[in-house]
């Protein structure tokens, strides 16, 4: 009896171990099956290490940006469109980690947990992916960048749909240059700067400092500041780009007065400015669908007074992600409601079934009071009307803020962030032109060309 009982216990242990192992295997298959299926060695999908058999990728108008034909992956007929949409579509070998062909490779293959790649064998193609991007506007944006490194993005701040997302440098996926490695011209070419890049924000960060001032200083709109060309602190001077004299809060924002905003930062204090930055999504992880967005960072906890003054005007160690800044612009334009950007409209099976659908959702990491957002919108409109001039953006009802971000190893990065307040064209825009000088002369001109195409 004892021996029988012992054998039964041993058998139970083996059965339990088997069931646990089976459970782990099924769970691993459920979690990783799509990734395993999309491995480069899978000849159903890849040929010579390059994606060959998969569904098509279309822009918002149904124009094919990438598709498979006779086991060969093909792209849009226009070389410029191919270059402009490379980072959104992705390359053939998945070097661009945030491209659709990499992130959604299992979906393109037609894989699902129950059927595996049966649909690929049945229909000889995988799922199609429709994007919210407009290929022709991306083409305009690519041409407007005119060889500069950087990025430009435009989205509908009511719906979240990204219609333009261009990152440079880029290349033609059908004719990949052989001399890219080690070539400065192609530095960071596999990085989608809009999603994964971070930059010193320069004066665009004054938007965050201004929001903090509106939140915490009751009389801020009636305050005046005296600019002598620099603002003195016990640990050094913050240099202004001009001598502005006595200016109101609005004029200080219009003229991007470093003295006034360094003074504001020190008056507000580190805790309040860091709290506002946190409310606006700094130091927080975020995703666009299944694609991780590199987080913006702001930390002045260890800064001395002069460094904190510089931080208040967008220098010091602050780094901002363009997609994140675009969402902040959307929140200001949309009376405090921050709608998350997305560019995968839907995924459609060969049988015509929509398996994944993009939707309008509110950001979980950005909180902005309606009254403060509306006051910021007025200030950013004032920038254009009273300083940049509406003639800079003819026919557009633009609000904006420029930035000239000083960096250690080259000419300043040029920024422009803003949005249209025309209810017929609810679009926000962000542009970074690397090593291109002042914000208005470089990024501002790029934005005008793109927004003219968007809002026509």
Image (spheres, rainbow, N blue to C red):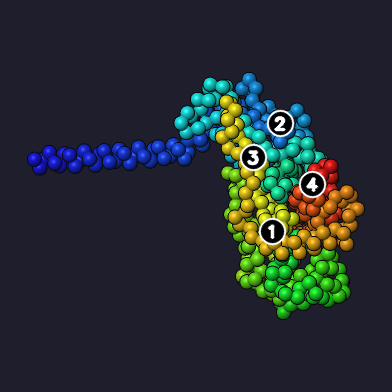
Residue position for label 2: 62
Q: CA distance from mark 4 to mark 1?
A: 19 Å
Q: CA distance from mark 3 to mark 2?
A: 13 Å
Q: CA distance from mark 4 to mark 2?
A: 23 Å
Residue position for label 1: 336
Question: Tag 3's secondary structure?
Answer: strand
Question: Tag 1's secondary structure?
Answer: loop
Circle 2: is it few (<14), some (14-19), or many (20+) Cα within 10 Å?
few
In the image, is residue 35 above or below residue 222? above
Q: Return the x and y of residue 370 as percentages of the image width and height.
A: 70, 62
Q: Are marks 3 and 2 in contact (CB under 8 Å)?
A: no
Q: Earlier in the sequence, mark 3 or mark 4?
A: 3
Which of these two is toward me, 144 or 154? Answer: 154
Residue position for label 3: 344
Q: Return the x and y of residue 337 as percentages of the image width and height.
A: 67, 56
Which label sits on residue 424? Answer: 4
Q: Earlier in the sequence, mark 1 or mark 3?
A: 1
Which label sits in the foreground, 1 or 2? 1
């Amino acid at each position: 009896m004892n021996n029988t009982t012992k054998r039964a216990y041993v058998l139970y242990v083996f059965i339990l171990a088997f069931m646990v192992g089976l459970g782990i295997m099924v769970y691993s298959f459920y979690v990783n099956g799509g990734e395993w299926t999309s491995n480069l060695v899978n000849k159903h999908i890849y040929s010579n290490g390059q994606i060959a058999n998969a569904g098509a990728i279309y822009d918002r108008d149904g124009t094919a940006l990438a598709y498979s034909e006779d086991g060969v992956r093909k792209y849009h007929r226009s070389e410029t469109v191919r270059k402009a949409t490379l980072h959104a579509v992705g390359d053939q070998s998945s070097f661009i980690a945030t491209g659709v062909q990499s992130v959604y490779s299992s979906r393109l293959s037609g894989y699902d947990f129950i059927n595996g790649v049966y649909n690929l064998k049945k229909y000889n193609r995988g799922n199609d992916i429709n994007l919210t991007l407009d290929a022709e506007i991306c083409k305009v944006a690519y041409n407007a960048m005119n060889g500069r490194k950087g990025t430009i993005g435009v989205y509908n701040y009511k719906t979240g749909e990204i219609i333009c997302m261009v990152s440079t440098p880029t290349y033609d996926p059908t004719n990949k240059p052989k001399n890219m490695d080690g070539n400065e011209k192609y530095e960071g070419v596999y990085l989608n700067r809009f999603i994964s890049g971070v930059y010193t924000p320069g004066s665009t960060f004054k938007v965050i400092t201004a929001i903090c001032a509106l939140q915490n200083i009751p009389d801020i709109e009636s305050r005046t500041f005296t600019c002598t060309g620099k603002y003195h602190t016990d640990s050094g001077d913050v240099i202004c780009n001009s001598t502005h004299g006595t200016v109101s809060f609005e004029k200080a924002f219009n003229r991007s007065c470093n003295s006034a905003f360094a003074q504001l930062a020190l008056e507000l204090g580190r805790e309040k400015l860091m709290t506002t930055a946190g409310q606006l999504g700094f130091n927080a992880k975020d995703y666009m669908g299944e694609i991780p967005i590199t987080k913006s960072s702001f930390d002045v906890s260890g800064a001395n007074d002069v460094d904190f003054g510089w931080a208040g005007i967008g220098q010091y160690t602050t780094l901002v992600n363009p997609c994140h800044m675009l969402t902040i612009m959307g929140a200001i334009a949309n009376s405090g409601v921050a709608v998350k950007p997305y560019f995968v409209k839907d995924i459609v099976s060969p049988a015509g079934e929509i398996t994944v659908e993009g939707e309008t959702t509110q950001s979980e990491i950005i909180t902005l009071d309606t009254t403060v957002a509306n006051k910021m919108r007025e200030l950013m409109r004032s920038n254009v009307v009273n300083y940049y001039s509406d003639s800079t953006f003819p026919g557009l009802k633009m609000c904006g803020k420029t930035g000239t971000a000083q960096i250690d190893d080259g000419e300043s990065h040029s920024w422009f962030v803003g949005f249209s307040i025309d209810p017929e064209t609810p679009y926000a825009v962000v542009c970074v032109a690397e090593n291109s000088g002042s914000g208005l002369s470089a990024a501002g001109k790029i934005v005008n060309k793109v927004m003219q195409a968007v809002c026509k």
